Amino acid sequence: MSWQGIEGHDEVVEHFRHMLGCRRLASTYLFIGPAGIGKRTFAVELSRCLLCLETADESLAACGRCESCRLFAAGNHPDLHLIGLPQGKSSLAISLFVGDEQEPGLCHHLALRPFLSTRKIAVIDDADDLNPYSANSLLKTLEEPPDHSLLILIGTALGKQLPTVRSRAQIIRFRPLAKSLLSKLLLDKQIVAEEKDAARLAELSEGSLTRAQELARPELWEIRQAILEQLARPTWDLADTERMVQQFVQDSGKEASVRRDALRTVIGFVLAFYQALVRSQVGGSSVDEASLRQIVDLAHTTADSADLDLCLEKIDACLDALDQVDRNANQALVISHWLQALTTPVRSTA
Ligand SMILES: [Zn+2]
């Protein structure tokens, strides 16, 4: 089933239909789920339906013809406010909410009466990146929401939300997209042409379309192959691998966030390799993806890779490195420490 062209979130659609049917729409929602699965698209589409002047709320449909739908399509609906992380910034600045000399902020806009529709809606994307000052500036709006306002915050994990927000919002969880749906979307959107490529990307992208799109870059697969081949060997050249990863991350783009994503992807490849290795050692499900299976089989022939504890340590090293990346640690240092941890077992001999 698809609602307004959005697939994979039928449960959330039904929830809203039900709540709207009994007039119990909350004033603040927090959409939680992995990046790249359509939470923002859903929030925007929900807003379009709720602002439409012709259709009933519970129908969750927009007419597409009224003044509201027309302005919405043109991207300048006076009762819709979209906020997200500005490019190159690492947090949502307080000025977005309280305004500055040039323009008033979101809190001011929400307090005004709607211009056209029956509500004013604010969609705050990247809520993971609200800083405490920004969240505090929202406090009054969250505690005493204007009658006509609807606030939708979007984040990737509940643990990343500030308590101020978490405790005052109704939480809606979005699930990762099913592999079969992801495969279909990759083909429909012509991100890949071949079914087998779509299946491979769907397998590796943890239910996220954005992630699958990132993984569709051919140079990613080259570096993945090069690194995994190294890891499957009994000994490998640390300096050489480090140079390769540093270069890849640098070449991926100028923006810090793009480089961070590239590094996260490379670490993810290695993590998936060790996870597959552990699964195969404990007799778990076989590895679906052919190139990874080959490397896992090869790794089995070396003594180190057959050591379960060592593999688990390496998984820890990857998770630590991902954590460092998320904390915006210096990328060159993260790469260096991470690869070091992969080569040297830290297990105590006691
Ligand atoms: Zn309409």
Image (spheres, rainbow, N blue to C red):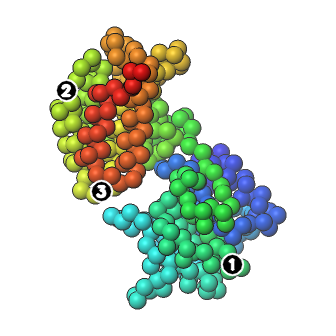
Find disc 1 in the rendering and name its residue: 144
Mark 2–mark 1 Cα distance, whole angstroms, equals 60 Å
Beta carbon of the mark 3 residue lies under 8 A of ligand 1: no
Please give the count of numbered marks on the rendered protein.
3
Mark 1–mark 3 Cα distance, whole angstroms, equals 38 Å
Q: Which mark is first along the chain, 1 or 2?
A: 1
Q: Which mark is first along the chain, 2 or 3?
A: 2
The quarter of the picture where residue 294 lies is top left
Evaluate whether residue 161 shows in this view: yes
- Residue drawn at point x = 19 percent, y = 43 percent: 247
The quarter of the picture where residue 86 lies is bottom left
In the image, farthest residue toward the top: 301
Residue 236 point in image, percent of width and height: 22, 23
> Looking at the image, is 333 positioned above or below residue 133?
above
Label 2: which secondary element: loop
Q: Quick check: 271 left or right of 240?
A: right
Find disc 3 in the rendering and name its residue: 256
Q: Nearer the viewer, residue 99 or 48?
A: 99
